Image: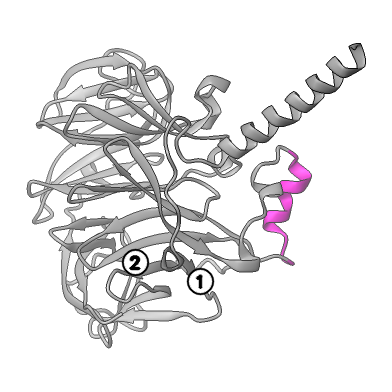
Amino acid sequence: MKKLFNCWKLNLGILMMALFFSQCGKPNSGGNSSQLTAEQVLKVDLNHQDELSDRNNLDSLSIIRLETSKECLIGNINKIEILENRIYILDKFKSRSLFCFKLSGEFEFKIHNLGDGPGEFTLPEDFSVIDQEISIYDNFRKMKINYDQNGNFISETKMVVSIRNILQLDDGIALVTPDESYLDSENDYNLLVTDRNIGKILERYIPNVTLGESIFSSNKVFSKWGTRILFTYGFNDTIYSFDKKDLMRQLVMDFGKNKIPYEIAETESREVRDRIFDTNYNYNGLLMDISENEDYISFRYTNFSLLKDHDPFLLYSKESKKVYNFTNIYNYEHRFKINPPMFVYKNKFVSKVTYDIKGESTPGLLPSEMDNPALAIYTIKRGY
């Protein structure tokens, strides 16, 4: 009888483990997972590289030169948003500031309240602008710090979890990618739904944070176009859509042999992790910087073996249902290069202008190396 009981316990344990692992792959710990159709799985051919330029489908390009002065020197653009004719730029690490410019490029103000007191922050991890309120999220103080539209401190609230990325929604909830380095097992998820102040967790999605969430910082994992929200996370080949508290798989990038194996993405072993940077491999992962407009979805990906002068991104055409691998965006007429899209403003993509192709660019069009960067606002014709 005892042997029979032990056998029953063993079978029950195996059954429970099977159920556990079958649930781990589902997007929502308490919801349903949609089935992928064949056209949603996109094969990415990294050997076929396209170029986007004014010679093919790059169109309606305009340049915004950001004002340069001692008060508004930008070290790097970690996040950009354009809302109500204002440009908001977050420089997370170098100046540790949130800058506000007019759409013309004229500087308005910056928020640079460094410290550990009320209204101050140590590191501005992310920001949001909603309902005439600017919020900066500081993981060190674990605070959501609120300012008015002129950058004046209003209030601050304690967050229940540190964040990596955030998207504030109009209905009083926020979508949060938590910062893995501050997580406990209870919040070890890739996506959290919280109240507006990140004071209460309402839903948890996609358990088991992977390597990509711990050693790399994913930029702009959310995109909002109309009522649709897209989301991805580190060392992951899938883009999800979020609608009315349902998370569904939308697009899956099939990198084939270039995909980072799960044994690397999920390991804590430094020896195994070092394989990512081994020159014998050509792994891809870490989808980021999602931007969507009426015709396309754009997103960057990490290729650890590419040279530094490459800044690849993928473009999914809603019309053809195909994905294209771009390594460069050029404007040959005025001789400059453009970074991959970071934001969408009035159906146009927004990117940072980088450097000349050959020789001198059009005089007065682009800033010098000592100036703030310029922004490119453009469309991509419906041809892909």
- On the rendered structure, is 120 left or right of 208? left
Q: Which residues are magenta?
A: 269-280
Task: Measuring from the top left, give residue 59's x and y in whole percent.
Answer: 19, 78
User: Which residue has dot 2 on it?
Assistant: 354
Task: Measuring from the top left, give residue 119's x and y in whole percent.
Answer: 25, 18
In the rendered image of this protein, does residue 210 appear above or below residue 37? above
Q: In which quadrant of the rendered view does residue 246 lie?
A: top left
Q: Secondary structure at mark 2?
A: loop
**Sequence order check, earlier mark of 1 and 2:** 1
Task: Measuring from the top left, give residue 136's x and y in whole percent.
Answer: 28, 29
Depth check: 185 or 344 in front? Answer: 185
Depth check: 152 or 301 in front? Answer: 301
In the rendered image of this protein, does residue 125 appear above or below residue 352? above
- On the rendered structure, is 12 left or right of 6? left
Q: Amino acid at mark 1?
A: Val
Task: Measuring from the top left, give residue 142's x and y in whole percent.
Answer: 39, 19
* Residue 305 visible within the image: no
Q: Secondary structure at mark 1?
A: loop
Q: Real-space Cα distance between discs 1 and 2?
A: 26 Å
User: Which residue has dot 1 on it?
Assistant: 44
- On the rendered structure, is 366 left or right of 305? left
As drawn, the label of residue 232 is none
